[in-house]
Amino acid sequence: MNGTDNLIRATDFAVFVKGLRGEWIPYPESGKIYSTVTGEFLKTQKVNGYLRLALTHTSGGKTYKSCIPFHRALWVLCHGVPFSLRAEVDHIDKNRENNTISNLRLISKEENTPRKLDYETAEKIRRQYAEGKTQRELAEEYGRGKSTIGDIIRRETFRCPPEKMYCKRRI
């Protein structure tokens, strides 16, 4: 166990406090959060396919602003604060817009890390784009953002094939 295993995220704490104060009420079956302050369901914005909440928290006379993934906020309101910085909330069906509580689970950061792209996959993406697939289609297929796919297509990443390792010394 390292020194950060028992810490919590400040945004998780702020969401938890809003739940305790009764400012935010979760609706787990529909995947929504109701604000008693505004009298409406919270509005979100989409960033890289995930819904995000703008978060304002006032404590000790100071106002703090931040963002938190919507699915994480819903998890904290329904299940409490995960007691590890490495804990992540995952969409079981991989649909980033399905935030019903039955579709969310808590897993480690290592379990949630997507498979890494390699040069061969980048070349395959370039071929598919040349054949007419859109960046959006490729992003969904490979589980990446459109900007990541764009970087690959423009050869800003994965420019050259990896060098082969060899030994100059003859055996």
Image (tube, grey):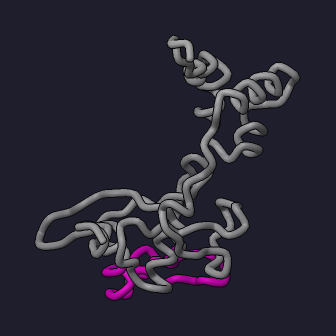
Q: Residue at (18%, 72%) from the top-left corner? A: 59
Magenta stretch holds residue 35: yes
Asked if the magenta segment contains residue 164, the reply would be no
Query: Which quadrant would the N terminus be assigned to in this image?
Result: bottom left
Query: Dividing the picture into quarters, in which one does residue 142 lie?
Result: top right
Q: Is residue 90 above or below residue 136?
A: below
Q: Tell which of 3 and 67 is nearer to you.
A: 3
Using residue 95 as the reference point, say whether residue 101 is left or right of it: left
In the visual, does 64 lie left or right of 30?
A: left
Residue 147 placed where, x, y %?
A: 59, 32
Give the total number of marks visible in the rendering: 0
In the rendering, at what x and y percent does residue 159 appear? 60, 17
Q: Residue at x 39, y 57 (%)?
A: 67
Magenta-colored span: 16-40
Residue 34 against residue 48 in the figure, above or below: below
Extreme right residue here?
Answer: 131
Q: Is residue 142 above or below residue 98?
A: above
Location of residue 149 in the rendering, given as x and y in whole percent from the top left corner: 65, 31
**Is residue 161 or residue 98 the one in the foreground?**
161
Residue 162 in the image: state x and y as whole percent. Answer: 59, 22
Task: Residue at 44%, 69% (x, y): give it.
Answer: 87
Q: Would residue 7 appear left or right of 120 to someone viewing this image?
A: left
What is the quadrant of the C terminus in the image?
top right
The residue furthest left is 60
